[in-house]
Image (cartoon, grey):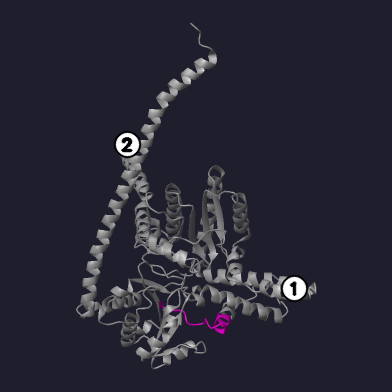
């Protein structure tokens, strides 16, 4: 009988241990699989419960909104509408083509006495439909950048402004080029002294020059599936109150009143 | 004494295990990579609990450290906190002094933590408004942790988004101005057309000079104290960010509220991801 040489012995031991390791690996593999499936099922269960909670609160809000629309809830009867000088509405671009909903919303706002409304959608579809909207909603004039803010509030009709992503970050880049030209013409004063070379008012003027000036809204209403401002011009929403209203297709007069009421009860410290 | 602390220890252990299990379930879905938070309500918390104002800020700092720990457990890489706005300098000098000393203590604690954990610390804001001691401490901490990338904690101090935009525009203007001067001085007329393109400020130039350029845009922005505004915080970076408003003061923020916010984010994830891809 041939004696087992060390390499052959090592090979035999290795095979034996691998025979033991393979089922162990398979076991761990299946434990891991089952664990992931259980976690995924738990995740879906949790989200089903969350969706049920949201559905229930949605029903409650719908009922409350109905009662507010009918004027049955006393606290919403008197609104200090003068607190809202400028209102902005962010509309999801997929809903921006629903001009009938947009016009209805504007009619509600005009009835409440809101003087200046900025309509924003990311892709600029509202801008493209502005002629249709202005034609069908004859209670408004188009906002011009040459308007001074105090003049806006004295207008008898609502001033309507159409804003898109083009008036946000891209406008800041265009305004920066305006400031660059001015800086080059001035010969670069202050560049070597480490001082601030532009002020906020110069930036605001530059934005007006490129056609993206406009007042900072007091309240911004988001009509969309998520609470997200979708790129509303950053320079104009520093201290703006943001309210999420849900999809445009589910808009109600009562929820609008509730949002405005909530805004009128807010007290801002502005960092103090 | 020991018999009283044992049930408490068991309760704490059970709470930790439940939290870890909940976090494990949460991670079965899409997770945010960046959470930003506005630390609002410290003074209200102190007033409600009859503490002095400084204690409210201490509790807020503790809550922030817990939040960083929870984000670390959840695998969330970027956390940004709005610690001090340039507007906050208008507060009472004692309160501003307290917040600055809290910032000093937090820097010291972060320095100790970063010796053992790969945490990158970044301070975003106009650091020139800080005292020389705090400014140097902040810069040293940023340099010492610049190579870490497992978790990035950004503390916004002396920060305002409008100031960030203005600073970024200034930096871009100065960069292009010096480039323009170089081209003019070199009298290189043949490349004028190319140089016109290079001398125009683009959105890329603006964004690279932002204080927050080291981090991606936040997926979630949490504001406590039931407030619904950004207060000049990251409005540039939050175009496609889920804005969450919690009806509690910041020192009361715990893992359950964080879980709720992330679940809400997961509900809207498909929509927000689609919006980000479309831009």
Which element carries disc 2, helix, strand or loop?
A: helix
Q: Is residue A138 left or right of residue B112?
A: left
Q: Is residue B247 left or right of residue B103?
A: left
Q: Which residue is mark 2?
A: B6
Residue lying farthest to the top in this orientation: A1
Magenta segment: does it hold A205?
A: yes
Quadrant in the rendering for residue A171: bottom right
The subunit carrying tag 1 is B
Q: Is residue B190 left or right of residue B197?
A: right
Q: Nearer the viewer, residue B96 or A14?
A: A14
Name the residue: 51% across, 77% down: A167
Magenta segment: does it hold B20?
A: no
Q: Is residue A63 left or right of residue B119?
A: left
Span shown in magenta = A204-219
Label ID, residue A252: none
Both marks 1 and 2 on one chain: yes
Name the residue: 49% across, 82% down: A214
Q: Is residue B167 above or below residue B216?
A: below
Q: Nearer the viewer, residue B30 or B48?
A: B30
Residue lying farthest to the bottom in this orientation: A156
Q: Nearer the viewer, residue B51 or B207?
A: B207
Q: Is residue B103 above or below residue B192?
A: above
Q: Position of residue B264 (x, y in %)?
A: 35, 59
Name the residue: 30% across, 77% down: A256
Count of numbered circles on the image: 2
- Whether residue A7 is visible to the viewer of this picture, yes or no, is yes
Q: Earlier in the sequence, mark 1 or mark 2?
A: 2
Q: Position of residue A67 (x, y in %)?
A: 20, 76
Q: Which residue is mark 1?
A: B191
Q: Are marks 1 and 2 in contact (CB under 8 Å)?
A: no
Q: Is residue B80 above or below residue A173?
A: above
């Amino acid at each position: 009988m041939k004696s087992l040489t060390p390499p052959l012995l090592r090979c035999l031991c290795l095979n034996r241990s691998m025979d033991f390791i393979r089922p162990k690996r398979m076991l761990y593999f299946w434990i891991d699989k089952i664990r992931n499936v259980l976690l995924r099922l738990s995740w879906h269960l949790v989200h089903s419960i969350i969706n049920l909670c949201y559905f229930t609160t949605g029903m409650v809000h719908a009922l409350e909104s109905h009662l507010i629309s009918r004027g049955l809830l006393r606290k919403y009867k008197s609104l200090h509408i003068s607190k809202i000088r400028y209102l902005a509405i962010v509309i999801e671009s997929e809903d921006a083509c629903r001009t009938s909903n947009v016009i209805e919303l504007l009619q509600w706002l005009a009835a409440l006495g809101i003087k200046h409304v900025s309509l924003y959608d990311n892709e600029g579809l509202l801008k493209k439909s502005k002629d249709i909207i202005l034609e069908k909603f004859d209670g408004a004039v188009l906002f011009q950048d040459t308007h001074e803010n105090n003049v806006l509030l004295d207008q008898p009709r609502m001033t309507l402004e159409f804003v898109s992503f083009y008036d946000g970050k891209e406008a800041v880049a265009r305004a920066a080029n305006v400031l660059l030209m001015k800086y080059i013409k001035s010969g670069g004063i202050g560049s070597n002294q480490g001082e601030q070379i532009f002020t906020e008012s110069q930036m605001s003027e530059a934005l007006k020059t490129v056609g993206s000036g406009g007042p900072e809204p007091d309240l911004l209403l988001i009509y969309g599936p998520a609470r997200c401002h979708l790129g509303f011009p950053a320079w104009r929403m520093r201290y703006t109150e943001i309210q999420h209203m849900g999809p445009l297709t589910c808009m109600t007069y009562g929820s609008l009143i509730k949002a405005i009421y909530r805004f009128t009860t807010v007290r801002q410290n502005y960092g103090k | 004494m020991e018999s009283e602390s044992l049930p408490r220890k068991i309760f704490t252990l059970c709470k930790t295990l439940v939290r870890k299990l909940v976090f494990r379930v949460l991670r079965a879905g899409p997770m945010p990579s960046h959470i930003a938070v506005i630390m609002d309500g410290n003074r209200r918390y102190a007033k409600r609990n009859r503490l002095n104002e400084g204690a409210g800020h201490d509790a807020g700092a503790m809550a922030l450290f817990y939040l960083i720990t929870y984000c670390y457990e959840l695998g969330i890489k970027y956390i940004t906190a709005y610690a001090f706005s340039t507007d906050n300098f208008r507060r009472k000098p004692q309160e501003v002094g307290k917040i600055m000393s809290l910032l000093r203590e937090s820097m010291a604690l972060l320095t100790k933590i970063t010796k053992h954990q790969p945490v990158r610390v970044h301070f975003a804001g106009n650091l020139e408004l800080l005292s020389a001691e705090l400014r140097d401490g902040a810069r040293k901490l940023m340099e010492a942790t610049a190579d870490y990338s497992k978790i990035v904690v950004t503390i916004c101090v002396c920060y305002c988004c409008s100031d960030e935009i203005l600073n970024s525009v200034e930096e871009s203007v100065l960069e292009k101005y010096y480039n323009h001067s170089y081209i003019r001085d070199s009298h290189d007329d043949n490349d004028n057309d190319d140089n016109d393109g290079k001398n125009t400020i683009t959105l890329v130039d603006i964004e690279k000079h932002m204080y927050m350029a080291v981090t991606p845009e936040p997926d979630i922005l949490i504001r406590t104290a039931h407030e619904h505004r950004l207060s000049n915080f990251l409005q540039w970076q939050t175009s496609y960010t889920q804005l969450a408003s919690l009806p509690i003061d910041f020192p009361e923020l715990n893992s359950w509220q964080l879980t709720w916010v992330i679940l809400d984010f997961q509900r809207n994830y498909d929509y927000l991801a689609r919006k980000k891809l479309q831009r």
